[in-house]
Amino acid sequence: MTINYDLRRAAWLYPTTPPITGPAWSKTHIRYFTIHYTGNNITYVGKDEKKVLNDIQKDYQTNRGYSFGYSSAVGLSGTTYEGRGTSFRAASNGDTSDKDDDLPGNPQLQDNLEVFSCLLIIGVPDKIPQAMIEAVRRLYASVCSELGRDLKINGHQDMDFTACPGAAAQLLINNNSFYPLAIDPDPGVDADMLVLPSPKRPIDTRFKDYSINGLTQKAGNPVGPGQFSFGIGVTNAVTQVEATVTAIPQNSIGGFLGVNDGDSFINWTSHDLHVPIPQTVTLRVVDGNVSLYISQPVHLLVSIRAEG
């Protein structure tokens, strides 16, 4: 799997612009999708976004001594750009040596280690168009798919003492407007589904206790094989959910995950050991539980995006 961008680095960097470099990123530590903005008191409407990004990279190299600091960028046009991407760790959020890590319960990790950052190419006077919002949603969904887990969207000011990413973007962040909307594949069946303002993760067998077959299980042990009923923390009135289900195979035997042993919506081979494999599906809920069949041991993650 790879993150989808409209333009990768090679497509927007000029031959005369220094290449983007930096320390390798850590896929394991990424927890936040952090929004930034260019922040100048000028408008970027009608400007050449490639030139803007090249100018930023040249300025970083000349005045800061390191490369363009953002993992990605999104223009007013709705175009998504690869920045540091998954090649290099972000360099846009400071770190604990600056005593700016205000995230609760996480003082030991550097901010740059934790984030996939996204630069909005907007100035202070600019309004954020729907095309930019949709582009951020697409990019966020692709990043989460690559990681096999949902990230929390926040603003630079949520992690440091700064006005970035500006009042307009921060309002959209606070309103959960950058999260992708759940897509209903069959409106006739799922018309009553309510999109959650932010996905919730009731099951993560790696790190949290969970309910299986009516009993509480401790985190850390893989599940399967067999048919299981998982409690997902919804009311009995909820009859179905749209969820991203991620399987992380724990042995070198191929297998599958489905609603029962007669179907599958995730399949894996012997080559997929410890590789997260996500799939967004609609699951039927009975008394607050969903039924899943697992053919071989996996760690299971379930993130609910909509319910009804």
Image (tube, rainbow, N blue to C red):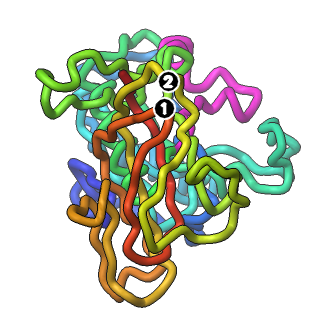
Q: Residue at x 38, y 41 (%)?
A: 243
As for residue 162 lying within the magenta part, the answer is: yes
Q: Amino acid at mark 1?
A: Asp
In the rendering, at what x and y percent does residue 105 appear? Answer: 83, 44
- 188 versus 273 height, above or below: above
- Residue stretch rendered in magenta on the structure: 151-171
Q: Residue at x 59, y 67 (%)?
A: 26
Name the image quarter holding the N terminus.
bottom left
* Camera-side residue of 225 and 275: 225
Where is residue 285, by image quadrant? top left
Q: Amino acid at mark 2?
A: Asn
How crowded pointer 1 is (Cα within 10 Å; few <14, some 14-19, many 20+) is rated as few
In the rendering, at what x and y percent does residue 301 appear? Answer: 50, 54
In this rendering, the count of numbered labels is 2
Q: Are marks 1 and 2 in contact (CB under 8 Å)?
A: yes
Where is residue 93, by image quadrant? top right
In the rendering, at what x and y percent does residue 228 appear? Answer: 47, 58
- 22 versus 216 height, above or below: below
Q: Residue at x 45, y 74 (%)?
A: 225
* Camera-side residue of 43 and 234: 234
- 80 versus 5 height, above or below: above
Residue bearing mark 2 = 236
Q: Residue at x 21, y 29 (%)?
A: 184
Q: How far apart are the two marked residues, 1 and 2, measured between alpha carbons?
A: 5 Å
Confirm whether residue 200 shows in the render: yes
As for residue 261 lying within the magenta part, the answer is: no
- Tell me, for residue 287, which label it has, or none: 1
